[in-house]
Amino acid sequence: MERKKILTIFVAAWISAGLLTWFLYASTKTPRVEKTSAIQAAAHDMPAGTLLRKGDLKTVRVIEKDAPKDAIVNPDAALNHPLLYPVTANEPITTSEIAGATGIEGLAAIIEIGKRAISVPITDSSGVAGLIQPRAHVDVLFTKPGSAVEAVTTTILEDVVVLAMGRATETASATPVASSIAQAPRTASQSATLLVTPDQARKLELAKNEGKISLALRNPLDHSLGDRGTTTSKELYPVPPAAPKPERIEPTKVIVEKQAPPKPKSVVEVFRGDKHVQEVFP
């Protein structure tokens, strides 16, 4: 009985020693698995001002404790946003390295090559009562003040894209930041930044100093051009109906019939003493 008890204790001690040895080995030799997270990184080297597209980003996994606190997890949060600083390949993209969704810091990066951005002052009445938002398409109307003969309104630019309204470069959405901007009180006057060609920029700048600028909102799918009509003050007032022209009275022709000359008469002279008498016979 004592021998069996000793054997049991020996086997238990041997198993315990084996488990302790395995635990120590696993703690020192087996690599430790740490929690990771997926973030967005640069797919290649990019300079400042690059407008981020799908091919510019890639998803990488990094140890959670090593990931930047402001790293971008959702790629949609970085798409179509310009870089404020240059980045290298595989470098994590952070929110501090891209322009904000409603900020104007990266406006220069979204200006197309060969075009310019120019701002025009507008009011609620000249800006479609605040319905014009960034990315909208508008026509630019120019009104020259003056007398009834000099005043004129004409369309000087057509199908122009609005880059920004004030300092907002994106349409207000349901996000908390955008909602606070949308609910903020609007001032009576602000500016609209338009994307134009250099020639259009010069024309627009001249119009700003010559008269009043107004914007006409149009369907973004309507790219038809050619509406360069001009309206003068005469077209604002109704034209009285023209008086009927008097009928022309033709002169009456008077026909005078010529009478036939009288027939010759026979005359007989009669002398009676000193009396002289003429007798006329038909």
Image (cartoon, helix red, strand yellow):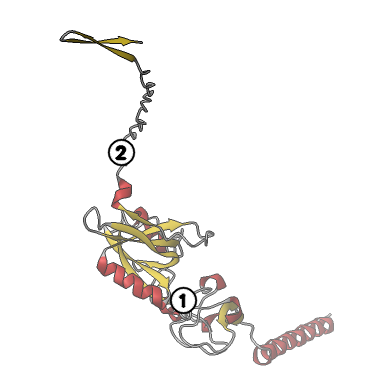
Quadrant in the picture for residue 180: bottom left
Residue 240 is labelled as 2
Decide: is 123 above or below 52: above
Whichever of callouts 1 and 2 sits on the residue coming sooner in the sequence is 1
Decide: is 23 above or below 193: below
Q: Residue at x 26, y 63 (%)?
A: 211
Where in the figure is residue 273, as x and y percent of width and height?
17, 8
Q: Quadrant of the C terminus?
A: top left
Q: Quadrant of the N terminus?
A: bottom right
Discs 1/2, front = 2
Reading the image, the residue beneath label 1 is 110
Q: Decide if residue 152 is on the left or right side of residue 66.
A: left
Label 2 environment density (alpha carbons within 10 Å; few <14, some 14–19, many ≥20):
few
Q: As shown in the figure, which amino acid type bears the numbered disc 2?
A: Pro
Tell me the SS state at disc 1: helix
Q: Residue at x 39, y 55 (%)?
A: 131
